[in-house]
Amino acid sequence: MKNPFKKSTWKKIGNDINKAVVQPVQQAVTPVVNTVVKETTKAVNVAGKTIVDTSGKLTKDAENLAKDTVNAIQKTVVSDAVKAYTETTKAAMATAKVADAAMADVEAGAKLTGQILEKGVYEVAEVGELIAEWVEENYCQIGVSIALGTIFAALLYRPEPSSQATTTAATAPLSSTAILYLSAKETVGAVALGTACDLTAKAFVELIWISKDIQKAIGSKNKQILTDAIAFTLAKSMDAAAGAMIVPQSCAAVVAGIVTTLVAQLACEQTLPSGAREWATVGASGL
């Protein structure tokens, strides 16, 4: 079956690509958030469970909610095309040695993105420079995903303090907004949601930009439109994924699934989700 959000189909997907040499993640990340709105003076309750206690800390209920949310997304029935695209992303991430604990979250992010892409895409005028092996062997999606997976393997669900600090900083605006979104959706305005998605998208694009291969695949002129596409997709995914986004580790892995799918889409098919173009001017208010 032809993938509806691709201009072409992969001739084959197999064999690992021994590519993607990147520098340690912690050397490339810089803080992008100076102030994050956090409710630290009262407990936050969702469906009768306390996800943030009176000291502002996430609880065990929050972790359980994140897992339940990811499980629900995994069980969502999707088209064969979205399923195939998601499975390819998962396989590439496994090859790149991404932690097993992150795989369900990555899958959730990829699946949500595939569903959004399936609703419509627009073609990007200027394209990046694909790495020769990826094109010649028809491994574009898996090649891009392995390159990104190598970066994310040093970040997702890692025990090192530097990795955990990077995860928390990169996801702070989205996680905080997700908590407020779950507790009182009507109080989260379009500007607040848009800002949180923009900051998170920017943090992750700067993170993946450490890879020269990814830079070439995306194209420097497309850096901003990729950032806009990620922010747009994050906002569109909030209703389904907010529960997973409240915990930094889970949030980072879900975002990684979104980022990987969009980068592969841009690099290999030169398209991005419809609506992403308008994000730069109208943000979440246009949703």
Image (spheres, grey):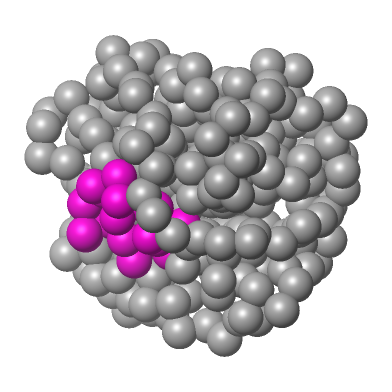
Residue 277 appears anywhere in the view? yes
- Establish if 240 lies above or below 203: below
Between residue 71 and residue 8, name the one nearer to us.
Answer: 8
Between residue 14 and residue 275, name the one nearer to us.
Answer: 14
Q: Quadrant of residue 80?
A: bottom right
- Establish if 147 lies above or below 1: above
Q: Quadrant of residue 115?
A: bottom right
Tell whether 110 sits left or right of 123.
left
Give the residue drawn at x 78%, y 68%.
4
Give the residue drawn at x 60%, y 49%.
138
- Establish if 4 lies above or below 282: below
For this orientation, the residue located farthest to the front is 136
Between residue 150 and residue 273, name the one nearer to us.
Answer: 150
Range covered by the magenta-colored residues: 89-108
Residue 241 image offset from top left, x and y in percent: 50, 64
Give the residue drawn at x 51%, y 60%.
13
The C terminus sits in image quarter = bottom right
Q: Quadrant of residue 3?
A: bottom right
Residue 70 image offset from top left, x and y in percent: 39, 70
The N terminus sits in image quarter = bottom right
Residue 95 on the magenta segment: yes
Residue 107 image offset from top left, x and y in percent: 43, 64
Between residue 226 and residue 212, name the one nearer to us.
Answer: 212
Tell whether 54 sits left or right of 20.
left
Tell whether 221 sits left or right of 137.
right
- Establish if 159 lies above or below 107: above
Residue 24 on the magenta segment: no
Residue 26 image offset from top left, x and y in percent: 26, 20
Give the residue drawn at x 11%, y 32%.
160
| Prevailing secondary structure class for the magenta stretch in the rendered image | helix
